[in-house]
């Protein structure tokens, strides 16, 4: 064999080894496990004076692969970096949703507490005047001046208001248990 064809063969082997490194589709087709890869690595190791098994082990680690569709078929390729970014973004959205759900639960507890306080204030607003009026009527009963004493009707109205307020408070306590 003359020198020129040998050099061309060596150039082809080097070129193919570079292309396998650069093109993951080619690595998929003629990479580790194929007869072409075995022949190429044997030729390349011989040309470069490298240990063939060490060369193959290094290439097994270094090569990247991309599936190639069969003729007439399309393959869905996924850029792994884009998929990772999309996954990370969706995970962040889910975390934010979970945080918002927790905040909503907390706000609902605050709302329920505010309603309870509002009910207590309403009860207090009804109970306090009724009790004050009842107290004033009881004290007024002891007055010597009959003009300052409440009438029987005023006294009964105060007793009814106090009874209504007490019933409201008891009803709320009984309903809440």
Image (cartoon, rainbow, N blue to C red):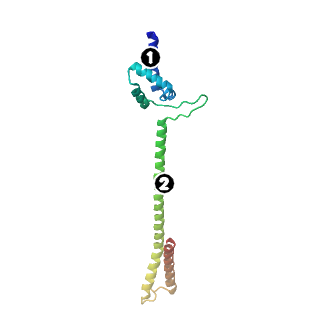
Spatial separation of the CA atoms under disc 2 and disc 1: 66 Å
Q: Position of residue 139 (x, y in %)?
A: 42, 85
Q: Position of residue 29 (x, y in %)?
A: 52, 27
Does 5 sit above or below residue 45? Answer: above
Query: Can you tell which of label 2 and label 1 is closer to the viewer?
Result: 1
Residue tagged 2: 101
Residue farthest bottom in this picture? 144
- Front residue of this view, candidates 9 and 73: 9
Residue at position x 43%, y 30% from top? 60
**Displayed quadrant of residue 55:** top left
- Front residue of this view, candidates 133 and 125: 125
Residue 10's label in the rendered image is 1
Residue at position x 46%, y 80% from top? 133
Image label count: 2
Between discs 2 and 1, the one toward the N terminus: 1
Q: Position of residue 135 (x, y in %)?
A: 43, 82
- Front residue of this view, candidates 117 and 147: 117
Residue farthest top in this picture? 2
Drawn side of residue 78 relative to residue 51, left or right: right
**Displayed quadrant of residue 148:** bottom left
Q: Residues within 10 Å of mark 2 (few under 14, many from 20)?
A: few
Residue farthest right in this picture? 72
Question: Contact, CB < 8 Å: mark 2 with mark 1?
Answer: no
Residue at position x 50%, y 71% from top? 176
Q: Position of residue 4 (x, y in %)?
A: 45, 10
Q: Residues within 10 Å of mark 1 (few under 14, many from 20)?
A: some
Does 57 sit above or below residue 129? Answer: above
Q: Secondary structure at mark 1?
A: helix
Q: Secondary structure at mark 2?
A: helix
């Amino acid at each position: 064999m003359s020198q020129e064809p040998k050099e061309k063969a060596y150039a082809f082997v080097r070129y193919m080894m570079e292309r396998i490194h650069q093109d993951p589709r080619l690595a998929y087709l003629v990479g580790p496990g194929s007869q072409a890869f075995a022949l190429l690595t044997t030729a390349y190791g011989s040309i470069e004076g490298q240990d063939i098994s060490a060369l193959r082990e290094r290439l097994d680690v270094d090569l990247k692969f991309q599936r190639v569709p069969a003729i007439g078929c399309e393959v869905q390729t996924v850029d792994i970096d884009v998929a990772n970014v999309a996954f990370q973004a969706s995970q962040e959205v889910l975390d934010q949703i979970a945080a918002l759900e927790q905040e909503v639960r907390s706000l609902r507890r605050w709302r329920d507490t505010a309603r309870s306080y509002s009910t207590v204030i309403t009860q207090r607003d009804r109970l306090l005047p009724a009790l004050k009026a009842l107290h004033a009527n009881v004290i007024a009963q002891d007055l010597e001046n009959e003009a300052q004493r409440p009438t029987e009707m005023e006294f009964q109205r105060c007793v009814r208001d106090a009874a209504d307020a007490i019933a409201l408070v008891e009803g709320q306590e009984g309903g809440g248990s």
